[in-house]
Amino acid sequence: MRIFVAFEDVRLPMDVQPGQTVGDVKTVLKDHFKLNSSHAEGKILRMIFAGAILRDDWVCSDIGITSTSVIKSVLIDSDQPVLHIRCWYNDETVVIRDQLDFSKTEVKQLQRLVSSKTGLPVTVFRLCTKDGKTMFGYHPLERYGIELGTTIHLHVWDGWSDLLKAATRGHTKKVLRNTSSIEQIAKYQFRVACYIAAHFGHVDLANSMINSKLGGIKPEEPVGQHPSRLWAKDSCHVDAWRTPIHEAVTCGKVNIVRIFVQNSICSLTAKDGSGRTPTQLGFGCKQVECVQYLTSKLFSSYTENNVTLPVMIVIKTKKWSERARESVLTNQGAYKSSTKKRTYRPQAMVGHGIYVDGFNHYAMNSAPIYPELNPYGDASNHDHHYLTQADKRDVLLRSGRPFHVRYNSTASDQQLPKIPDRKSAEKHNRGTPNTRLNSATGSYLQTPVPQKHRLPTIAEGQFKTIQRTVARVEGRIPLPAISFENHLRPFFHATPKSNNPIQSTMKNFAKYRSMDPRDNAIQCMTMASTFKDMPWLRQVDLAISLASRGVKRSVIERPGCENQAKSLPKIAASPVKAK
């Protein structure tokens, strides 16, 4: 296909073959315009199409570039990344471009910067070098050999990967499904999820976390430390006591701030680890809308039980009443106290263990709940290899998590026979006429009922049945009662002993794409959403095309399959100067 590349004031026609990438087009463009010379040193070539910045590994035919399409190319100043943060919980890399002095910048400052980029609280992850050495807060980066362009690895708590991925995407049900069965750890996970929802602006997840029936988290509660590290809370990072409302104000999420204030009026005066309120933080971050809303709430009145008072007096009264209820609960017991939920207090408790940096076995390795070997084996073998049940039990014993032992049994004769419940049979047949107990078998028998008033039988053919066509409605689209379609549709014939064809297709898709089909669909839709000039339905079609062509290319490029020779696009004609 022939496309046109616009550079400065000229337009260059170029013939691009199927399978050629954006990087191939850039290579030809740099050679033609001599962009590798000294005058272009320190600059990079960027190509833009439909409002999206094209990446070098994207295939031109896959991203909606058709014949006669025009791609804009510009030279911009090189913005080389200072550091790369490899996030193992979601297999992504975060680029840090802020200028850092490695001899003076401490690790805790880098942790704060990484937290602002990823949306994770500082107590959820740890940073380590390429060699696996953990980086501690008060040491400079130079001590760990960090240089320009170094890759730093980010690991989270074991078994938290699915929870954090669901929270960053705003999937409330998946967050609730992946929480721990231990109450203290589950509360800590809810606070983390509420913090992440405040960072990304997920309204549904934030509502669920502050709901008393689900998460029960207060917006003014700090995220805090993991229960196994509360014994060292005095030496933790200062941002560990950052609350969800502070994070919402920092990111400028006004809708989340409104939800938090409506849920708890006391969140207006909440303080972070540095003693700043949300209003003070909003002034520092120049979030005008958040500051206007918080200021209007602070200097307004609050009505409850037909009593109107200034907001500051209401906040002080609520805090005093909470302290009074806590005192009654502590001194006189729960019978005389009206406390429904105790205020969060970061206190270490017996049974949660003690986690000491540098001494304990690290529980922050981004490992799944059931650690697995490489699910696809080596590069030439795609068979699944999982840990045995005994290995999983040993891992769970070391981590302190509950587990259930399952014994696989394929023989049908190992199942115990069902014993009939006599009491339930008596209850079921109680009051039923014409029943008697069989003493031999212990079951109830139904005596035949005399057929005195039996209706006469109707012979076939005496009456004609009237069939009415009823139009079924699926969703909002009414379907016709009778289909006149003559085209044959694909038919799947599956015997009871064969596998479900849909499940087998999904397994093959995951095998060749090395990821779950749902995650691949999300990735394709995220990639298609970068083309902001396209209509939404066109973005959906592009995501479908990316998913189908991606799996086809993965099958073709497998080892042992024939690959076409790599070639570069060709310049069709001399460049035309734009008017």
Image (cartoon, rainbow, N blue to C red):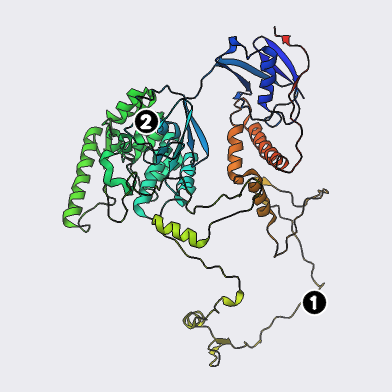
Q: Position of residue 412 (x, y in %)?
A: 61, 74
Q: Position of residue 179 (x, y in %)?
A: 43, 51
Tell me the mark number nearer the camera, choosing from 1 and 2.
2
How dense is the environment of label 2, judged by Cα within 10 Å: few (below 14), some, or many (20 and up)?
A: few
Viewport quadrant of the C terminus: top right
Q: Is residue 498 left or right of residue 240?
A: right
> Gap in Å between the C-alphas at discs 1 and 2?
98 Å
Q: Which residue is mark 1?
A: 459
Q: Amino acid at mark 1?
A: Ala
Work out whether residue 116 can be spotted.
yes
Q: Is residue 500 left or right of residue 140?
A: right
**Residue that protrudes farthest toward the bottom in the picture:** 439
Q: Is residue 494 left or right of residue 404?
A: right
The kind of secondary structure element at disc 2 is: helix
How dense is the environment of label 1, judged by Cα within 10 Å: few (below 14), some, or many (20 and up)?
A: few
Q: Position of residue 559 (x, y in %)?
A: 70, 43
Q: Which residue is mark 2?
A: 143
